[in-house]
Image: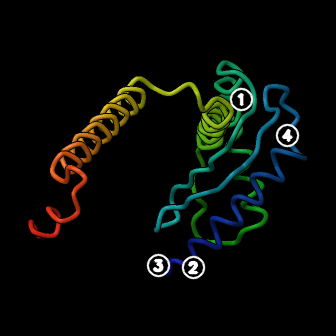
Amino acid sequence: MKTHRVARIAEVIREVASETILFKMSDPRISMVTVLRAEVSGDLQHGKIYVSVMGDEEHQKETLYALNGAAGFVQSQLADRMKTRFLPVLTFVLDQGIKKSLEISKLIQEALSNPSKLSDSDQIKEEETEEETDEEESDEDEDDDVEQEDSDGDPSEVIKEE
């Protein structure tokens, strides 16, 4: 089956699911739900609707359970809108992408606001680089001392040596 047809059907499923959840469902367990995307199998037999639920873990599980229980109602609303030979069996899946992105953003903000708090490995690397630069500086100082000892201040000796 053509991929653009599957993509169009997935978009229709997403629209119908979001309209149904927002305007036509009156279950109090279903609240603060955002329909993110829908995926449909190539044979149009199965569909997954990815949702994001704001709230704690218990509220998310309860809402997901209620949504999967109401999947038949969403399918009936989809049948009114879509005239195809097969109507996909819908399941709701909790999408953790937004939650993970918020956690990563929080970690980045903490790192940017507290640059002095480096991890142990970063502190060790800094100490090693400081020691290396100190050693290089002391080596350069020793080389300068050797050059001065060779010249003894007499320019004629410097010319002869060259």
Looking at the image, residue 60 sits to the left or right of residue 88; the answer is right
| Rendered image quadrant of residue 131 | top left
Q: Earlier in the sequence, mark 2 or mark 4?
A: 2
Residue nearer the viewer, 161 or 75: 161
Q: Amino acid at mark 2?
A: His
Residue nearer the viewer, 118 or 88: 118
Crowding at dot 2, Cα within 10 Å, few <14 / some 14-19 / many 20+, comes out as few
Residue at image mark 3: 1
Q: Amino acid at mark 3?
A: Met
Asked whether the beta carbons under mark 2 and mark 1 sit within 8 Å of each other, the answer is: no
The colour scheme is rainbow
The outermost residue toward the top is 58
- Please name which of the two marks, 2 or 3, marks the residue nearer to the observer: 2
Q: Secondary structure at mark 4?
A: loop
What count of labels does the image hold?
4
Numbered tag placed on residue 4 in the rendering: 2
Crowding at dot 4, Cα within 10 Å, few <14 / some 14-19 / many 20+, comes out as some
| Rendered image quadrant of residue 47 | bottom right
Residue at image mark 4: 25
x 85%, y 40%: residue:
25
Q: What x and y, as percent, mark residue 63?
A: 71, 29
Q: Is residue 140 above or below residue 123?
A: below
Residue nearer the viewer, 91 or 127: 127
